[in-house]
Amino acid sequence: MKTGVMPVGHLSASQVRSVLLAATAPPPLRNARPWRFQCTPDAIELYADPLTPGTDSEQRERLLDCGAALLNLRLAIKAQGSHADVRLFPSAGRPDLLAVVRPEGYETIAPHDGELVAAIADRQSNRRPFTTAVVPAVVQRQLRRAAEVERAWLATITAEQVPQLREIMRHAEVPPGPPGPGGGTDLDVEPDRLVVVIGSLHDTALGRFQSGQAMQRVLLTATAAGLSAALSSQPMAAPATRRELRQLLGGGLWPQIMLRLGHGAAVQSLARTPLEDIVISDEHPYSAGRPDGGAHRGFR
């Protein structure tokens, strides 16, 4: 019998509900939320909702989204005073089972991670134009460190690289979008805008999953610093433009996601999917092959 939200380890049912709400907070790159969770007496299991058939780009975005959910889950368990013991891809026969997270023992959350937990509720994608205010160098160092903590890397697009990036974006057929709410003039890819790419050394499922955790830690770090963020995976959607972007970054990293970071006006929070719809239970069983939502273009 699958009971949905239930006590896990020494976490009560209400604590489990709290950490699952945090895990499902990240706005997904695509319309559908590609994660499913199952509670057992001693662990929370994270499954990727399958795509049918799913392009390589869709599979990559799915792993990025699930990685973001896992990072939030890990932080939220820490906020409950417990250590999150994580096993990635624990079963070779179940590629859809991405992680098993066991709340074990006790752990005091570090002040910085506490700030990230507080930022979970405020983190929203923002496609509105940003101001020209410069992101301080100390914050940029914090963003790079956030990616490295999750075994990924953050590369900053320099002013000299902007013309090449704009050309890559045009090859990817990203529409510029009108000025004002919901879009930006020519994607705001300008020499005075902070645009970064999160990448991995290996373009494997593990590398992409870790990049998703890095993406979320970077985004939460940015939110805690008062920054807004817009996400774009469109340059990575086509193999040709992804290769061009990889070469622009020096050829050592596989680009997984691009972020535009800066100071922008607040945006309205998105409605969340009811928790019961994404927690596996007898009422909501795990079902493979559910179609995913449509792809987003440009920065999200």
Image: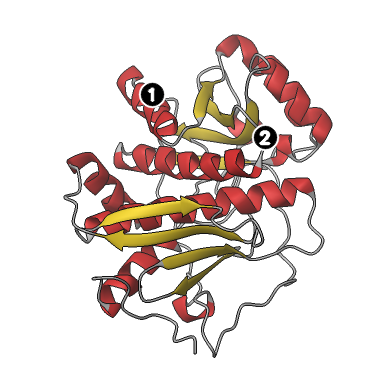
Check disc 2 and report the residue beneath it. 203
Check disc 1 and report the residue beneath it. 140
Would you call the spot at circle 1 few (<14 residues within 10 Å), some (14-19), or many (20 or more)? Answer: some
Residue in front for this viewpoint, 270 or 44: 44
Q: Which callout, 2 or 1, points to the residue nearer the camera?
A: 2
Q: What residue type is labelled 1?
A: Gln
* Quarter of image, res 234: top right
Residue in front for this viewpoint, 48 or 298: 48
Label count reads 2
- Kindly tell me whether residue 206 is visible in this rendering: yes
Judge left or right: residue 107 versus residue 155: left
In what element is the residue under mark 1?
A: helix
Report the colour scheme.
Answer: secondary structure
* Quarter of image, res 290: bottom right
Q: Position of residue 203 (x, y in %)?
A: 67, 34
Judge left or right: residue 79 versus residue 175: left
Q: How far, Cα to Cα, is label 2 from label 1?
A: 25 Å
Q: What residue type is labelled 2?
A: Asp
* Quarter of image, res 158: top right
Instruction: Give the mark nearest the N terminus, 2 or 1.
Output: 1
Residue 227, relative to residue 194: is it above or below? below
In what element is the residue under mark 2?
A: loop
The residue positioned 35% from the left and 54% from the top of the image is 85
The residue positioned 45% from the left and 45% from the top of the image is 216
Q: Where is residue 23 in the image (x, y as percent from the top left)?
A: 42, 61
Judge left or right: residue 168 versus residue 261: right
Judge left or right: residue 35 versus residue 74: right
The residue positioned 46% from the left and 52% from the top of the image is 87
